[in-house]
Amino acid sequence: MFAALLALTAAAFAAVDVNNASVADLDSIKGIGPGTSAKILDARKSAKFKDWGDLIERVPGIGDKRAAKLSEQGLTVNGDAFKPSASKTASRPQKVPEKAVAGTKVVKDDGKQ
C-alpha cells in the first residue's frame, strides 16, 4: 500500500526536462503557459539548452527567480534542478556604507584630480 502511494506521489512530481518536453509537458508545469512554452520551443529549435544559464539567457522572461520557481515545480535542464549561480552573486558589486567604521576614514572620490 505504501509503495503504491509513493509511486503515485512520484508520478505527480515527475520531472519535465526542457530539452525533451512537448508543449503539453511544458504546460503541465505550474508557471508555464502557452506563451512561455512557445518561447522555450522556439529557442530550442536552434540547439538544446546546455544548462539553466543557457535557458535563462535564451528565453525572454525567465530569470533566476522564475527559474527557481519552475524548478520547484519539476522543470529540469538535462536532468538538473536549478541552482543559483555563485558567480552571479559574487560578481555583484557590494554596497559600501556611507558611515565610517570605527577607526577608518570615509573618503569620497569626486573624480577630480
Image (tube, rainbow, N blue to C red):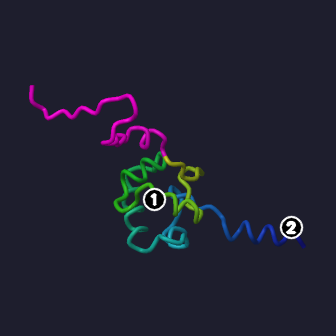
Q: Residue at x 44, y 47 (%)?
A: 53
Magenta residues, start to end: 85-113
Of the pair 109 and 9, the residue shown nearer to us = 109
| Disc 2 target residue | 3
The N terminus sits in image quarter: bottom right
Rounded to the nearest angstrom, the CA distance separating label 1 from label 2 is 34 Å
Tally the marks.
2
Identify the amino acid type marked 1: Lys
| Disc 1 target residue | 65
N-term-proximal mark, 1 vs 2: 2
Residue 63 percent location from the top left of the image: 40, 57
- The local secondary structure at tag 2 comes to helix
- The local secondary structure at tag 1 comes to helix
Identify the amino acid type marked 2: Ala
Residue 108 percent location from the top left of the image: 21, 35
Mark 2 neighbour class, 10 Å CA radius: few under 14, some 14 to 19, many 20 or more? few
